Amino acid sequence: MKKHSFLMRLLLFFLVLATGSVSRLSAAESPGDSLFNAAYTDVQVLINEIDRTSQYYHYIPAVDHYLDAVADEGVTSSKEVVARRIAAQNVLKEQLAELYDRRVAARSEYEEEYTKYLTEGDFDALEALEKKYKGQVEGFDSEEADFRVEYDHKVANAAENLESLYKSLTLAVEEIKLDVLAAEQIYLKCLEAEELLLRATEAQKNSQAGRELQSAINEARAALNKDTFEVSAFVKMLEALLQYIESFTHETTGVNAPVLTETRADVYTTGGTLLLHSVTKAEAARKLPAGLYLFGGKKVCLP
């Protein structure tokens, strides 16, 4: 009977060795890491898109500089969040390394005492030792779980920061969408207005309408070339510039450059809802609030 008990305990010893071996634990990817990686990718894609758009508008410095600033803010903020994640990873690695050392020490002590008691045939001591070591392993596992939960919470929080950053960058770009379209039209209308003045007589240029138009052109050019960008400023400026061009055209003779083409087309929202049927841009501008619309299949900004 004792021999049978001895063999069973000896078998148990080898099973414990096979299943309870100590391995160096690593800071494996957590659910928080997955959230972070997805949010980080979204932010980087958005920043790259803003940067590309900024380069496209190099000929309108105000838009270019504004978008550059938005992209730079995104880069700086995302780097700060990444730094917090790296700090959390380093803390977890240090915790797991220290825990690994304690696991190894406990395992070495267990194996040494197990060999001693097994040699002496002290099976009661072996049983107590097994119970003690099992409790230590469970304690280590619990500590590791706590470390990983704490890490996951930190990284998930960092992911939320990135999601907030994505929303703020998107909002910053959305807020100036109409202004950007207006700035493009201002740029083109300035060229058109300068052509009007170039073709005009000296008397027409020196008329009140001519002087007001030249002043409006100068103001518009200055605004387009600024380093700063005021939200809604370009939409208002476009409306004023169009009025000055219209006044100059109506009050002078021999200068023909209609502000709004007389082409008729259907007007839709950008979402595809029909608003007006077979109207000119001038008619649409009178009937609809200022904003972005589809006119003849093309996006236009109506003042």
Image: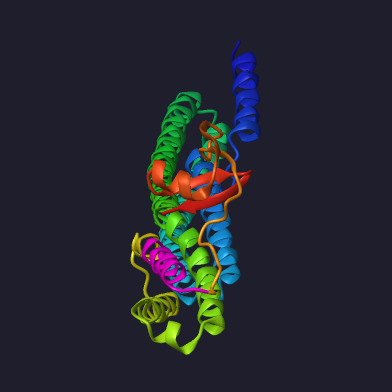
Foreground residue among 29 and 109: 29
| Outermost bottom residue | 202
Q: Quadrant of the N terminus?
A: top right
Foreground residue among 217 and 16: 217
Residue 79 placed where, x, y %? 46, 64
The residue positioned 58% from the left and 62% from the top of the image is 48
Residue 237 placed where, x, y %? 37, 66
In the picture, measured across the screen, residue 197 lies left or right of residue 88, that is right
The residue positioned 39% from the left and 49% from the top of the image is 290
Place residue 88 in its image quadrant: bottom left
Q: Main secondary structure of the magenta part?
A: helix
Q: Specify the color scheme.
A: rainbow
The span picked out in magenta is: 238-253
Place residue 34 in its image quadrant: top right
Place residue 115 in its image quadrant: top right
Query: In the image, is residue 107 above or below residue 55?
Result: above
Residue 217 placed where, x, y %? 43, 78
The answer to if 247 sits in the magenta stretch is yes
The answer to if 249 sits in the magenta stretch is yes
Is residue 105 in view? no
Q: Quadrant of the C terminus?
A: bottom left
Foreground residue among 285 and 29: 285
In the picture, measured across the screen, residue 17 lies left or right of residue 74, that is right
The residue positioned 50% from the left and 81% from the top of the image is 197
Foreground residue among 226 and 214: 214
Is residue 287 in view? yes
Query: In the image, is residue 177 above or below residue 150?
Result: below
| Outermost front residue | 253
